[in-house]
Amino acid sequence: MEKKAERELFSKVHIFDSTLRDGAQGEGISFSVQDKLNIVRALDGLGVSFIEAGNPASNPKDLEFFEEVRKIPLETARLVAFGSTRRKDAEAKDDANLKSLLAAGTECVAIFGKSWDFHVTEILRASLEENLAMIRDTIAFLESEGRTVIYDAEHYFDAYRANPAYAMETLKAAVAGGAAVVVLCDTNGGTLPDEISSMTARAASELGVPVGIHCHNDAGLAVANSLLAVKAGATEIQGTLIGFGERAGNANLSTIIADLELKMGITCVPEGKVAELTSVAHRIAEIANVSLEVGMPFVGHNAFAHKAGMHIDAVTKNPRAYEQVPPESVGNERSFLMSEVAGRSMIIEKIRKFDPNIQKDSPVAAQIVARVKDLEHAGYQFEGAEGSFELLVRKNIGKYKPFFDLQYYKIIGEQPIKGVTCTAFAQVKIGVDGEMAITAGEGDGPVHALDVALRKALERFYPGVHSIRLTDFKVRVLDSKSATAAKVRVLIESTDGEKAWSTVGVSTDLIEASWIALVDSFEFKLISDVEKRFKAYL
Ligand SMILES: [Zn+2]
């Protein structure tokens, strides 16, 4: 990087993401080369300044990645290869690891070195002087090869607590070697905010180069510590976008970006990009194959979900009552959760969709509120089961007629037989306006078999059923303490290619719970079709 561009970039607050390096240390995280390329695209789309992409010397997968990533045109992000200072007994130019770092072909490299005297003498088994030389030489060598060097001072805060003079000397060695930025790392994640502030402030005022911060979350303080470091003068914030990493994880950058931009008025990503935070966070979770914590600040599914009745009532009057920032500012959405404590006003809102004239004090409204509470007590949950909720409302306001009578259903299970994929058979008998239909279906498990049989029976009377596809099926055991008597809640998601809906069923019997959710799904579709046709005649 040109010296002028380098100075300008590092002097402004900017984001350095280490999802592909430190984040990959998290439990259950394993990225294929394709995953890594997709993460690079997602992070670049968000406008981070640096993406740390691992160590090309560590394995062939990383080497292949560095070859592939060069083909991706990046808008804001620069790739960073990561490695350590040279070995204690070799010259930098002969060090195999440093050679492979250069071979990665990135403009920037991050080098970590030891700041803690105890680590130098006990773990590295080098003299304090030798360690300073290793830091200085390594950086000077990479600099002379045209690289922009980001220096990570490992264990900086522990080091400073143990021996402040030596810790500062290691940073000065990095500056002498030509580091563009010196990053103070709370590697063990146990430093308290006031120490982060004072120690960062000293480094920022004495070094003469920009300073960065790299926090781990072992004490639950990684975000707070990172923000305080910025206040103390740090300009580079390292972390992982959704916080994953070894042990308790790294500083969560999605939270930090939102806090800096929306609360502290500090720009760290290009204009307009904060509003993409939620979608990028979900994308990263999807690629990493982890579920994004629902309560994750700003970007979690529940970050703007209101549940308590009084809160919902207040938020419908003015969102500021219970929201720190508008959900759309981070690309998230406000939602209201149905619950035992949900206020009547919430349910009334939903009923108005079918009966715009319903009043808050109407007896029907009270009846529906009571019914929802009973069902929730029995284990139902209407959050994420809008289809079933709509049917419930319809049944109570007289906008529902059953489409069929169930006479019986029967399931015969089979052990998997070699070469045969179906493991269950179902038989269903239904009546529609006095006419009977008996059908059978086979499927991959009892619920699938039931779905096939019911669909066949209904298709004779209602061809619209043909377009329904079940897209998701979730089972949750509700009261796992009483093993066999435990209730299960089944959530089914369906689509007809135009819209999607979800339905719920609860029972002590898995098949019955599935049946209830399945019937709701078919009825929801049929009732919507009837209404659509009816509207077409108006
Ligand atoms: Zn780290």
Image (spheres, rainbow, N blue to C red):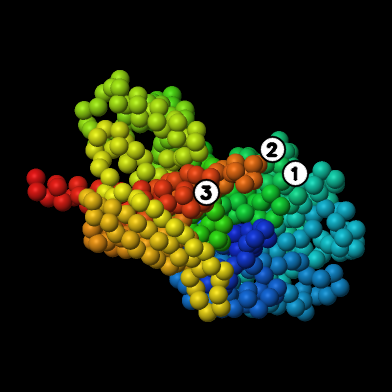
Does 475 appear above or below 264?
Answer: below
| Crowding near the residue tagged with mark 1, few <14, some 14–19, many ≥20 C-alpha atoms within 10 Å | some
| Crowding near the residue tagged with mark 3, few <14, some 14–19, many ≥20 C-alpha atoms within 10 Å | some
Mark 2 or mark 1: which is in front?
A: 1
Three-letter code, disc 2: Pro
Mark 3 or mark 2: which is in front?
A: 3
Residue 190 marker: 1
Mark 3 or mark 1: which is in front?
A: 3
Residue 207 in sight: no
Residue 407's spot in the image, x, y percent? Answer: 35, 51
Does 21 appear above or below 324?
Answer: below
Q: Is residue 520 left or right of residue 97?
A: left
Front residue of 486/301: it is: 486
Front residue of 110/319: it is: 319
Q: Could you tell me which residue is drawn at 68 percent across and 46 percent down?
A: 217
Q: Could you tell me which residue is drawn at 9 percent across and 48 percent down?
A: 537
Q: CA distance from mark 3 to mark 2?
A: 52 Å
Front residue of 535/83: it is: 535
Three-letter code, disc 3: Asp
N-terminal of the pair, mark 3 or mark 2, is: 2
Per the image, the residue denoted by label 2 is 193
Residue 193 in sight: yes
Residue 509 marker: 3
Residue 469's spot in the image, x, y percent? Answer: 35, 61
Does 345 appear above or below 12?
Answer: above
Q: Are marks 3 and 1 in contact (CB under 8 Å)?
A: no
Q: Are marks 3 and 2 in contact (CB under 8 Å)?
A: no
